[in-house]
């Protein structure tokens, strides 16, 4: 059974940092791009960042560019999201997923194997 599980969320103050982890089990995704999305209450799930396969290419939403960094560890079948200079507007449930081959990384519907998410709350 394929599972993705996110961890590392929490309650922090504006300006703080957090590192989220996404651990996959059941199969490896070395040949797939992986992505992070977030969803705030009452809002649509929005793209945050994506990372390529062995080339390590990354893509970020404008709202997090320069503050967040996505990375992956193939030996651990995991993806990470380092979040710095957090703002109250970053408050959301953060989820990771696997991008289907050949699909655009910014479109939610192009992802599969969603994890349950980890909550990030940033106080002002």
Image: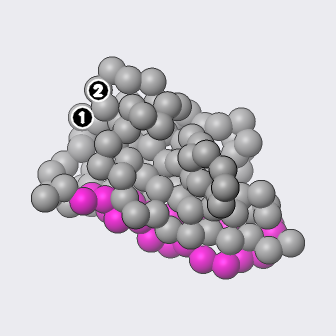
Q: In the figure, 27 relative to 59: above or below? A: below
| Residue 12 shown in magenta | yes
In percent of width and height, residue 29 lies at: 24, 44
The residue to which callout 1 is attached is: 31
Q: Are marks 1 and 2 in contact (CB under 8 Å)?
A: yes
Q: Residue at x 45, y 43 (%)?
A: 35
Residue 52 appearing in the image? no
Which residue is the extreme one toward the front? 42
Q: Position of residue 90 (x, y in %)?
A: 71, 58
Quadrant location, the C terminus: bottom right
Residue 46, picture quadrant: top right
Side of 82 where 76 appears, left or right: left
Q: How is the image coloured?
A: one colour
**Of tags 1 and 2, which is closer to the observer?**
2
Please state which of residues 6 and 85 is positioned toward the viewer in this rendering: 6
Q: Which residues are magenta?
A: 3-24
Few, some or many residues within 10 Å of mark 1 (<14, 14–19, 20+): few
Q: Quadrant of the N terminus?
A: bottom left
Q: Residues within 10 Å of mark 2 (few under 14, many from 20)?
A: few
Quarter of the image holding residue 112? top left
- Please tell me which residue is depicted at 65% across the width and 60% down the height of the picture: 41
Question: Which mark, residue 4?
Answer: none
Q: Residue at x 24, y 34 (%)?
A: 31
Element type at mark 2: loop
Q: Residue furthest top?
A: 102
Give residue 50's position: percent from left, percent from top: 48, 39
Rounded to the nearest angstrom, the CA distance separating label 1 from label 2 is 9 Å
Would you say residue 85 sits in the magenta stretch? no
Residue matched to label 2:
101
Answer with the quarter of the image where residue 123 lies.
Answer: bottom right
């Amino acid at each position: 059974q394929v599972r993705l599980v996110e961890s590392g969320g929490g309650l922090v103050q504006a300006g703080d940092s957090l590192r989220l982890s996404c651990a996959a089990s059941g199969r490896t995704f070395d040949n797939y791009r992986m992505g992070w999305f977030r969803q705030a209450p009452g809002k649509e799930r929005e793209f945050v960042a994506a990372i390529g396969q062995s080339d390590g290419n990354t893509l970020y939403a404008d709202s997090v560019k320069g503050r967040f960094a996505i990375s992956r560890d193939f030996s651990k079948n995991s993806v990470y999201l380092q979040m710095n200079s957090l703002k109250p507007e970053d408050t959301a449930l953060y989820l990771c997923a696997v991008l289907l081959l050949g699909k655009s990384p910014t479109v939610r519907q192009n992802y599969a194997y969603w994890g349950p998410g980890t909550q990030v709350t940033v106080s002002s």
